[in-house]
């Protein structure tokens, strides 16, 4: 249908168009029109692009680039912070462990010292007690020997008296002493 | 044209592959003369290209979102692609021409793709349009070359690495090739777009014949796919050649 109307139009001004010899591209009567509107179009497009569109797109692109760069930098910073934090944590952990070990060692040393002191004290006490006991035992033993001597003298005196002799105390004592030594 | 009589005879097979390129006033009678200020289908489709570009780049990026929306993302990709192309091909000091190259690239890209819409008008299929674009590039490059390098810009034509005897001959060849640039630059774009659209129209004419219409429809589909590629590639080629010429202007030494 379009070709029909075009055909009709063509037929209507066929005589006028005949000058174009078939090729509308070579119909110079329309050149002025085309060139005029082309120049208008190009000026408008150039104005719109160079004044509005291109600066805006350039701005958006550089802004995006800036945002990406700063985001990457921030991410890098945060990563560094995380690494630092991890290092600090590890250091704190190591410090705490060293501290704990030190405390354990100190406590061990203290306890050892206390233990040594207590042991020394106990040893001294035991030694004193032992000496005391030995002394007491010696006294007891001496006492026992004296008593034995007394008992022996008395017994000897009695035995001598019973046999009818009056015994000289001194000779009895010396005799008992001599026996006790042997 | 002969096809008019032919069309009346058969009533079926009609070929007007070039009628789609006719510039006609948008309002008023079809036969009205086209003055330079007349609002024509050229005006309409260029305006649509402007609207599409504004929609993509201005409204698409109005949120200035750090995480872009889909539309903003497309705009950013086109921006980054073109910027990198200018920087890589023409050098770092060519970045101040980036808005200019972006304007050309986006206009051609959008005009090419809008021209592929059915019933639309392909503004870039007209040699008048592409010639103005190419001449603009040619003049810009030449002026920039002389302003930046003075007479040193003529070193572009003096191939100092060639043997001395060959240099004048090479200079003539270089000079010719330099002036052929805007011609090839414009005809490459206009010719590609025009040829693709004309071929599609020819196959569309064949589609009226029942026996070959499936083949014709399939062919239109295939060519349409090809033209989608061509529309992008031609816009890219135009832009990258502009960058190459700009590099020559900024660094004329071989």
Image (tube, rainbow, N blue to C red):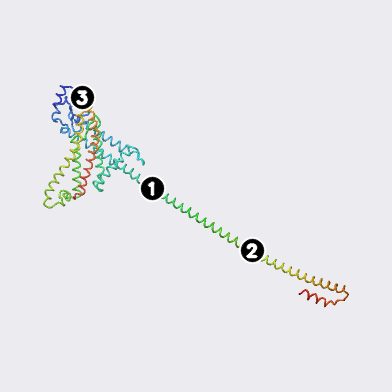
Numbered circle sitting on residue B211: 3
The residue depicted at 37 percent of the width and 46 percent of the height is A68
- Alpha-carbon span between mark 2 and mark 1: 69 Å
Q: Position of residue A180 (x, y in %)?
A: 77, 73
From the viewer's perspective, tell me whether residue B116 is left or right of residue A91: left
- Alpha-carbon span between mark 3 and mark 2: 127 Å
Chain name for mark 2: A
Q: Nearer the viewer, residue B150 or B254?
A: B254
Q: Which residue is mark 1?
A: A72
Pointer 1 and pointer 3 on the same chain = no
Q: Position of residue A31 (x, y in %)?
A: 17, 34
Pointer 3 and pointer 2 on the same chain = no
Q: Against A111, is A49 above or below?
A: above
Q: Nearer the viewer, residue B221 or B231?
A: B221
* Residue A4 seen from this side: no
Query: Which marked residue is nearer to the observer: mark 1 or mark 3?
Result: 3
Q: Nearer the viewer, residue A12 or B106?
A: B106
Q: Against A7, is A57 above or below?
A: below
Which badge, 2 or 1, is on the more N-terminal residue?
Answer: 1
Q: Against B241, is A101 above or below?
A: below
Q: Position of residue B250 (x, y in %)?
A: 21, 48
From the viewer's perspective, tell me whether residue B247 is left or right of residue A166: left
Q: Nearer the viewer, residue A37 or A75?
A: A75
Q: Which residue is mark 2?
A: A119
Pointer 1 local density, CA inside 10 Å: few below 14, some 14–19, many at least 20? few
């Amino acid at each position: 249908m379009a070709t029909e109307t075009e055909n009709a139009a063509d037929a209507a001004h066929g005589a006028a168009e005949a000058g174009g010899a078939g090729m509308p591209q070579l119909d110079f009567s329309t050149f002025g029109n085309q060139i005029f509107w082309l120049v208008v179009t190009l000026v408008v497009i150039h104005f719109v692009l160079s004044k509005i569109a291109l600066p805006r797109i350039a701005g958006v692109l550089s802004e995006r680039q800036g945002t990406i760069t700063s985001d990457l930098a921030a991410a890098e910073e945060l990563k560094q912070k995380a690494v630092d934090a991890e290092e600090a944590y590890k250091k704190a952990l190591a410090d705490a462990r060293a501290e704990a070990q030190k405390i354990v060692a100190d406590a061990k040393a203290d306890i050892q010292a206390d233990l040594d002191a207590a042991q020394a004290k106990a040893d001294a006490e035991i030694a004193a007690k032992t000496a005391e006991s030995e002394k007491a035992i010696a006294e007891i033993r001496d006492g026992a020997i004296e008593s034995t001597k007394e008992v022996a003298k008395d017994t000897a005196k009695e035995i001598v008296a019973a046999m009818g002799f009056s015994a000289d105390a001194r000779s009895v004592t010396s005799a008992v002493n001599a026996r006790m030594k042997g | 044209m002969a096809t008019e009589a032919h069309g009346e005879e058969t009533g079926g097979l009609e070929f007007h592959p070039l009628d789609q390129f006719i510039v006609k006033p948008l309002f008023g009678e079809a036969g009205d003369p086209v003055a330079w200020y007349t609002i024509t289908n050229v005006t309409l489709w260029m305006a649509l290209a402007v609207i599409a570009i504004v929609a993509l780049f201005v409204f698409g990026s109005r949120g200035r979102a750090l995480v872009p929306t889909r539309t903003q993302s497309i705009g950013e990709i086109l921006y980054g692609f073109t910027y990198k192309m200018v920087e890589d091909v023409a050098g770092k000091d060519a970045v101040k021409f980036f808005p200019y190259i972006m304007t050309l690239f986006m206009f051609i890209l959008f005009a090419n793709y809008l021209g592929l819409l059915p019933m639309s008008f392909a503004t870039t299929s007209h040699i008048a349009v592409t010639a103005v674009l190419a001449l603009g590039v040619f003049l810009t490059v030449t002026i920039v070359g002389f302003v930046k390098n003075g007479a040193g810009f003529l070193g572009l034509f003096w191939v100092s690495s060639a043997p001395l005897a060959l240099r004048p001959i090479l200079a003539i060849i270089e000079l010719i090739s330099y002036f052929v640039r805007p011609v090839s630059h414009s005809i490459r774009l206009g010719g590609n777009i025009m040829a693709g659209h004309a071929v599609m129209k020819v196959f569309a004419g064949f589609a009226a014949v029942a026996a070959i219409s499936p083949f014709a429809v399939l062919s239109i589909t295939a060519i349409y796919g090809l033209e989608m590629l061509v529309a992008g590639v031609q816009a890219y080629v135009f832009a990258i050649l502009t960058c190459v010429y700009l590099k020559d202007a900024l660094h004329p030494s071989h």
